[in-house]
Image (spheres, rainbow, N blue to C red):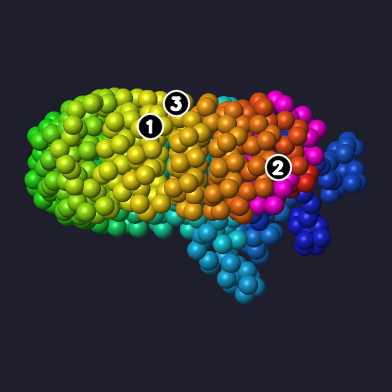
Amino acid sequence: MPALVNYRGDGDLYSGASLRSGDSGLLLSNSHVEIYCPPRKRSRISGPCVISGNIFEDNRPSVDVLPDECLFEIFRRLPGGRERSSAACVSKRWLTILSSVRSSEFYNKQHVSADEDMEVECDGYLTRCVEGKKATDVRLAAIAVGTSSRGGLGKLSIRGSHSLRKVSNFGMSAIARGCPSLKALSLWNVPSIGDEGLFEIARECHSLEKLDLCQCPSISNKGLAAVAESCPNLTAVNIESCSNIGNEGLQALAKFCPKLQSITIKDCARVGDQGIASLLSSASALTKVKLQSLNITDYSVAVIGHYGKAITNLVLCGLQNVSQKGFWVMGNARGLESLSNLTVSLCRGITDLSIEAVGKGCPNLKHMCVRKCCFVSDNGLVAFAKATSSLECLQLEECNRITQIGILTALSCISSKLKSVSLVKCMGIKDLSMEFPALSPCESLRSLSIRSCPGFGSTSLAMVGKLCPQLHHLDLSGLCGITDTGLLPLLECCEAGLAKVDLSECSNLSDEVVLALARLHGATLELVNLDGCQKITDATLAALAESCPLLNDLDVSRCLVTDVGVAALSCGVQSNLQVLSLSGCSMVSNKSIPALERLGGTLVGLNLQHCNSISNSKVEMLTEKLWRCDILS
């Protein structure tokens, strides 16, 4: 073994990838980056060899004739991570052998320096993410070798895989052997990784805390159960679109993972009531639960209501087999005493009766979100508002049986802690001319968002203004039916002073309402969004410039503003304008460049997209002068 005897240390190392003609370039995870080493040969034997009278040139290094077992013994005696990384650069064979050495099998840990020993013993804190073409077994092997002596790999994400050189169980084995400190593993869309890969993780990575499996059809209950049994520190598990994981895997989590705090199960056809019930009744530490698109029934939801005493965040989505009875039992079981955040989407079982039961059975509920639940009407919303006592945030999206009568009544009778209300695409809302009885104002409400509800008009807005006198944030984006006349009463009723106002796509609003906004709330305004308000002109910019010293975010995209308005804005009282969007303002031209330069002292974001009257050369000049500002053009 002359090559081994003549080895001189670091000075004799090189970054060539291969010592064999058949090898191509390699990838090595050295330090904090992966390094590609192109193929290169280096002859260690230059003299001819005479065998049986034949003279030939032998360019193969003599150490490479050793069998894998001998190289394994040599490599595990290398003194440190730098030497191992250098050796892994030599060829794919050497990298493969090095990646098969477990961290515990390196022979001479006691001989390394104190600093390096401290590094080796450190818990994993490094993070690596490989996606698409970069997700190969060679890269995983390189990561395993390159991170083993530098604090250890703590988090690994694999997303997709190379179409030909697919990441496989071999790569997972390399990670498992070289990275026992692994704490978080995420596998997305990697069908070539199966139970064998998880077996290796379970065998070596006992510190695993987070497991995320998405679109992994080759992983079954056996692989999940192996991880659950060998990794008792698991606190978070996410299983999505894994067709071969079912009840047995969840039962293993319930049995072996007492520290489990967060579980997400989505679109797994084999998961049923048996698995969910076992998990929810056994995992007493669970605080976050998300169940989506599962074939579970009323029984599972009832179990949540009985045993979910520690649950604080609960998401139930697309549970088509859960009826009104299941949600009613969940509320009346009175077991969700810690629940503070509840989201229910696409569940036909949420009706007026069941949502009232939820309000009564969750005494600490602070955030309630109901999406696309078509059987909730005004009666249920008002009953829920009267039953709940701690609610701070209410979100309703595509609940088309709810009208403005239910909304206004709920606002009037809801608890005094309510701070935020959001209505999105509620098509049942239609402006009515009828007189409402006197309603009590909701003094606690600070944020109101009514987006893309085309029937919400001026009459409803005037009523909202009377009910919500303490608003700070107002979002009416997409309400094409509101006019200046309808919005002005609301602005006049806001006593506390509005800070953020979003009126984007309110095409019927004009300068008049913005002038009133600046006059009434200019001292507090920080954000104004008028994107798509086609009747807004330079008068708006002049008013905002004159009356809004705190304004830091302004969007007048696709408005009728010109160079005159931009000039007025640049001479205004606002001293901290950070974001300005003029996208689609075709009447803003090169003449505005000096004004934009004056504004550039504070700007960090400027949108000039589709400003066709501004030349590219002027934009380039502006980009050079405003080097701290991100300019979109």
The answer to which of marks 1 and 3 sits earlier in the sequence is: 1
Which of the two marks, 3 or 2, is nearer to us in this view? 3
Answer yes or no: is residue 197 visible.
yes
Front one among 505 and 438? 438
Q: Which residue is mark 3?
A: 508
Quarter placement of the C terminus = top right
Quarter placement of the N terminus = bottom right
Amino acid type of disc 1?
Thr
SS under mark 2? helix
Q: Residue at x 38, y 32 (%)?
A: 485
Disc number placed over residue 485 in the picture, else none: 1
Badge 1 crowding class, 10 Å Cα cut-off, few under 14, some 14 to 19, many 20 or more, is some
Q: Residue at x 46, y 41 (%)?
A: 516
SS under mark 3? loop
Asked if residue 335 is among those painted magenta in the image, a careful observer would answer no
Please state if 281 lies on the left or on the right of 484 as rendered: left
Q: Residue at x 56, y 53 (%)?
A: 549
Amino acid type of disc 3?
Asn
Highlighted magenta segment, given as a residue range? 595-622
